[in-house]
Image (cartoon, grey):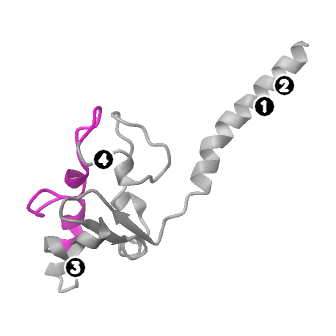
Amino acid sequence: MRKLGYIVLIVAGIGLMAGPVAIMAQQTAPETVILKGAPMGGVRFDHAAHQEKAGQKCETCHHPSKPERALTSEQQRCQDCHTTKAEAPMTTKAQAAFHDPMFKKGTCPDCHITEAAAGKLAPLKCNECHKKENV
């Protein structure tokens, strides 16, 4: 009877460890994402193009887990944690996670402004990314 208990514990332990590994292993980046929730309209985000520009470095945009909310996958959706209105324990709402109100600093403008200054095509105006049809 004791042997059966040990076997059950071992199998359960392996299952608990394999779950997160399996989730991370099967995770693939989507080609295009619609970032919804902005009053100006959603943003059609070409994930593949941005990933290529970032040199396939996911951490360029996806930051490590914060104490406020632990990751459930290695690179999860921004809006899994950053919602339209910051909900405790989070303190940063979705808009602020992407850029400040004037698009002068943040994850998006840090690259867009640099690209535009180098003569490359990068949207800098609100309506160039935010579209009402992407609500």
Q: Quadrant of the C terminus?
A: bottom left
- The structure residue drawn at horizontal position 84% and vertical position 25%, both measured from the top left corner, is 7
How would you rate the neighbour count of disc 4 (Cα within 10 Å): few for under 14, some for 14-19, many for 20 or more? some
Disc 4 to disc 1: CB gap under 8 Å: no
Residue 81 higher or lower than 3, as above or below: below
Q: Which amino acid, by three-letter code, is at mark 2?
A: Ile
Magenta span: 86-112
Q: Callout 2: helix, strand or loop?
A: helix
Q: Callout 1: helix, strand or loop?
A: helix
- Cα separation between marks 2 and 1: 6 Å
Earlier along the polypeptide chain: callout 3 or callout 2?
A: 2
- Cα separation between marks 3 and 1: 52 Å
Q: Which mark is residue 11?
A: 1
Quick check: 24 left or right of 32? right
| Percent x, y of residue 29 | 49, 65
Disc 2 to disc 4: CB gap under 8 Å: no
Q: Callout 4: helix, strand or loop?
A: loop
Residue highlighted by disc 3? 122
Residue highlighted by disc 2? 7
| Percent x, y of residue 118 | 18, 82
Q: Between residue 57 and residue 1, name the one nearer to us.
A: 1
Disc 2 to disc 1: CB gap under 8 Å: yes
Q: Is residue 63 visible?
A: no
- Cα separation between marks 2 and 4: 41 Å
Disc 4 to disc 3: CB gap under 8 Å: no
